[in-house]
Amino acid sequence: MKNILSPSILSADFGYLKDEIEKTEKAGAEYLHFDVMDGLFVPSISFGMPVLEAVSKYTKQVLDVHLMIQEPIRYIETFQKAGADIITVHYEACEDLKATIQKIKDCGAKVGVSIKPKTDVSVIEEFLDDMDMLLIMTVEPGFGGQSFIPESIGRIKEARAIMEKRGRQIDIQVDGGIYLHNIEEVLAAGANVIVAGSAVFKGDASKNVEDFMKVLDK
Ligand code: DX5
Ligand code: ZN
């Protein structure tokens, strides 16, 4: 399974968003992670469709949209039209996850499902056949810059084992507190799509992405 870096623009300098994104694209990050927060599912509010639409006009990166919003089914089509290539919804935020997944498929985007750190990994099993990516949150969703929860390693391994049992291996994305010092551990556990916010955008984004790519391309 291919290793991919998905820099989270939540930690970027929004005054220079275009430059920041261009640096990550040039340095080899194939995805761009876009954290949408509604102040309800998570305490904070970030940004939404108009920003995504603007960004989609100047980058060729895969737009990896992480919806931290209650009942995301209401906005799937709008996000897809605004440029989302992958739409990830939270298991905990959907009254009818099956219908939400179907809506994502119908509009032609790839399906991601995310689980918070305290949600049983086994809940995803019945949805696996219709998913392209599982996002295992490695911090409580809501803010950038938090510390990686060590128990996440066991959860990644558990997810890979469930996939093995079902005969369906899909991408496993990890999000929250990922840095160069713990990336090898999450890769070894079975994750292959790496979200990094602070580790990419604090300091020199080009150099940071290059350093990540050296480990991911090994
Ligand atoms: C947290 C977001 C993350 C966040 C990660 O709720 O989903 O994508 O930007 O930031 P870092 O890498 O700084 O933990
Ligand atoms: Zn995220």
Image (spheres, rainbow, N blue to C red):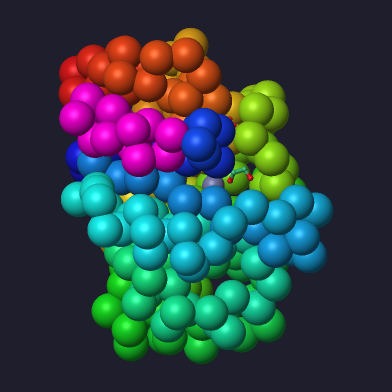
In the displayed structure, 73 sits above or below 51; it is below
81, 180: nearer the viewer:
81
Q: Main secondary structure of the magenta part?
A: helix
In the displayed structure, 108 sits above or below 205; it is below
Horizontal side, residue 210 vs residue 69: left or right: left
Residue displayed at 44% across by 72% down: 79
In the displayed structure, 183 sits above or below 84; it is above
Counting the numbered discs, the total is: 0
Residue 39: which quarter of the image?
bottom right
> Which residue range is magenta in the image?
16-28
Horizontal side, residue 212 vs residue 158: left or right: left
Residue displayed at 42% across by 60% down: 52
Give the x, y percent position of residue 201.
Answer: 47, 25
Q: Is 17 covered by the magenta stretch?
A: yes
Give the x, y percent position of residue 139.
Answer: 66, 37
Horizontal side, residue 10 vs residue 61: left or right: right
Q: Visible in this render: residue 55? A: yes
Give the x, y percent position of residue 50.
Answer: 47, 65
133, 76: nearer the viewer:
76
76, 46: nearer the viewer:
46
Residue displayed at 58% across by 56% down: 47
Give the x, y percent position of residue 117.
Answer: 68, 45
